[in-house]
Amino acid sequence: MEVSVLNIKGQDTGRKVVLDDAIYGIEPNDHAIYLDVRLFLANQRQGTAKAKERSEVSGSTRKLGRQKGGGGARRGDINSPVLIGGGRVFGPQPRDYGFKLNKKVRRLARKSALAYKAQENAIVVVEDFTFDAPKTKSLVEVINNLKIDGKKSLFVLPGTDKAVYLSARNLEKAKVMAASALNTYKVLDADVLVLTESALGVVGENLK
């Protein structure tokens, strides 16, 4: 699949790049995508929720009632879970919500996400660019020139570019990330994927 290379003014440079069929032309695997997105969202969770159990609640350990003859179940001290202010039974504990997912499955998921974008003609390739200084207005001009304003866009750069990253920080529908950090969730979350020429090569190397 051939895609024209544009400059940041939205003009066709006359050059074309070929999107590797081994990445952008595969049959997408929805289950691999599901697993990878689930892992991504699980890793975003802090897992710091904590409730005190019976042994952790501060309170007297004096036995409240006699063992038998009270007409009800034995409830022990004031820290009993059946009493207000007592401990919680099987409450949440700090934990890691992540799980193991094979590298090949994660790679397949990223390929599948990129293949979906290729099928939707939602991939734009631009010449490598940078800004002299962080300026939101500069990135807005690029977005308008590429005619993707109003759409959620993901700019993929070959590496970390602080000027471009900071220029997008105040834009709700524009995100910037390095090609090495590209993940399934971010690709699917964007309406348009804007790849620089160098980033295209980095993505290809990472997904071989």
Image: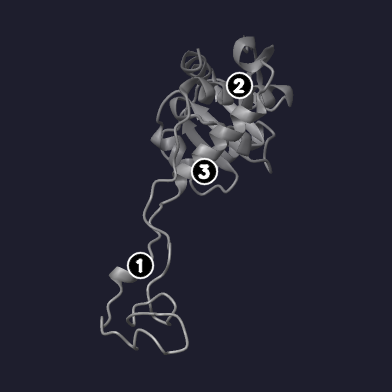
The reply, left or right, for residue 136 in relation to residue 83 is right
Q: Quadrant of the N terminus?
A: top right
Alpha-carbon distance for marks 3 and 1?
28 Å
Is residue 142 in view? no
User: 78 and 168: which one is in front?
Assistant: 78
- Figure coloring: one colour
Identified by mark 2, the residue type is: Val
Is residue 74 in view? yes
Compared to residue 115, the image places residue 64 above or below, namely below
Residue 81, position in %: x, y?
Answer: 41, 74
Q: Are marks 3 and 1 in contact (CB under 8 Å)?
A: no
Residue 182, position in %: x, y?
Answer: 50, 29
Neighbor class of circle 1 (other Cα within 10 Å; few <14, some 14-19, many 20+) is some
Q: Which residue was labeled with disc 3?
A: 41
Instruction: State which quadrant residue 5 falls in.
Output: top right
Compared to residue 186, the image places residue 172 above or below, namely below
User: 164 and 177: which one is in front?
Assistant: 177
* Dot label at residue 2: none
The reply, left or right, for residue 198 in relation to residue 19 is left
Residue 139, position in %: x, y?
Answer: 54, 38
The reply, left or right, for residue 66 in relation to residue 24 is left
**Residue that lies at the very extreme toward the right in this rendered image:** 120
Alpha-carbon distance for marks 2 and 1?
56 Å
Residue 40, position in %: x, y?
Answer: 50, 39
Q: Which residue was labeled with disc 2?
A: 125
**Disc 1, SS:** loop
Alpha-carbon distance for marks 2 and 3?
28 Å
Identified by mark 1, the residue type is: Glu
Q: Which residue was labeled with disc 1?
A: 53
User: 89 and 13: which one is in front?
Assistant: 89
